[in-house]
Amino acid sequence: MGALTTAINNVWVVLAAALVLFMEGGFALLEAGFLQTKNMVSIILKVWMDLTAGGLAYWLFGFGLMYGANRLGLFGLPHFATIFAAPMLPPHLSVYAFWLFEVAFAIAAVSIVSGAVAERIRPMAYLIFVLVMCGLIYPISGHWVWGGGWLGQLGMKDFAGSGVVHTVGGFAALGGALVVGSRRGRWSGQVSETPASLPLAAVGSFILWFGWFGFNAGSTLSATSSLIGIVAVNTQLAAAAGGTVGFILPALLHKRYDVGTALNGGLAGLVAITAGCAYVAPWAAVVIGSIAGIVVTYAFTLVQRIRVDDPVGAVAVHGAGGVWGVLAVGLFARQGGLLYGAGMHLLAVQALGVVALACWGFGASYLVFRVLAATIGVRVKPEEEEMGLDAAWQVHGGFVSEETTPEPAWASAGTMAH
């Protein structure tokens, strides 16, 4: 019976990992749809960097730092370039299936950053950031919660990653966007804010929603878990509530319908329920998703008001949505939640955790991008940005002669925008 259980669990977790990895297609299409037409193909190349280089970095360094033997509650004892018997591994699951599932989460975290720095970042600078994010930044904070680290020891609850993946990724995106700077002419109306293809963005959102069932239900790590059903139901309800609010709000506030806000409302609902999907009742999932739809709308406005150029709304959806999702566990968890009469302890732990994760994601990302700006540069040339990165990077095919094309983006020194 033990061998059969292990086999079934392995199949379940590998399938869930495949669903999460398929979400990269959703990220690529969503971001391509929200950007300018001249940068649609280049963003797909960046998401491909997440999937390829990011996965290798997590194999080389990340997994060991995240799930190795705990050291001072801060990081795991590294086992580089190996897949080993992680101390936190469930007893009836292959370590290889577990690693595949976990690498998909690391890749998702760095993909959040790709859209926030789109249309103006140098490809080699972004590639280096991907390696650092998946090999160091994400695994260290992941260890704090899931690998036996200090936040997990305090009792923080984050079932599938509103904090570990989305808050860290969202605030890393904020740090990157601040250092890379705004697109030239963004605040003077010279940059088109008309999405290249809302149907493409919608298809990307549908794929993300579909993959999220692997993200959340797969986090049970067991095909026989009694939580699979409630996790899936809560995921669906929160996304539906967030998407409904995202549809209604623009109609009430601005007398118009906004597809982008509706899509981001649904995604914010998914982000927010990810922490508590196994801990809350279905009615609470609807409340959490509904509030997420409101949070993302006003967070997007705030990000614009402080003049952070985030073309796809990654900071609002993942950063703000992730913060709300982590805090919501402290309110709505059936065991330990404030609204169930359990007091403030869990909510206080959740608040401490989300502050720590947000500060780490922002601070580490900001530092890495600053170092890159001071060394190889993070910005493409003005003329490359003007013509679009699809042409500047020659992503449509082979290189052509220097007489007919400008110097490629990766050959330029690059400067920061002011």
Image: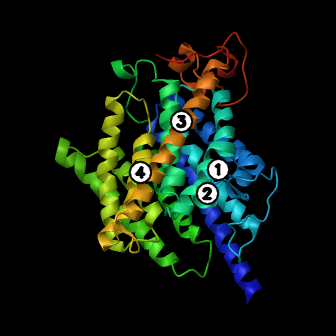
Rendered residue at 45%/24% (across/down) = 182
Q: Which residue is mark 2?
A: 149
Q: For the residue marked with disc 4, what is the amino acid?
A: Val
Q: Residue furthest top?
A: 403
Q: Secondary structure at mark 3?
A: helix
Marks 3,1: beta carbons within 8 A: no
Is residue 329 visible in the rendered image? The answer is: no
The residue pinned by badge 1 equals 139
| Marks 4/1: CA–CA distance | 19 Å
Q: From mark 4 to mark 2, how far is it between C-alphas?
A: 20 Å
Badge 2 amino acid: Gly
Amino acid on which disc 1 is placed: Pro
* Residue 323 image label: 4
Between the residue at mark 3 and the residue at mark 2, the CA separation in whole angstroms equals 19 Å
Q: Are marks 4 and 1 in contact (CB under 8 Å)?
A: no
User: Callout 4 environment at 10 Å: few (<14), some (14 to 19), or many (20+)?
Assistant: many
Res. 201 in view: yes
As rendered, which of 311 and 85 lies closer to the eye? 85
Distance between the alpha carbons at the discs numbered 2 and 1: 11 Å
Labels 3 and 4: the sequence-earlier one: 4
Residue at the spot 59% in from the left edge and 33% down from the top edge: 42
Regarding mark 2 in the picture, which secondary structure is present there? loop
- C-beta proximity under 8 Å, tags 3 and 4: no
Q: How is the image coloured?
A: rainbow
The residue identified by callout 3 is: 363
Quadrant position of residue 305: top left
Q: What is the x, y in percent for residue 85?
A: 78, 65
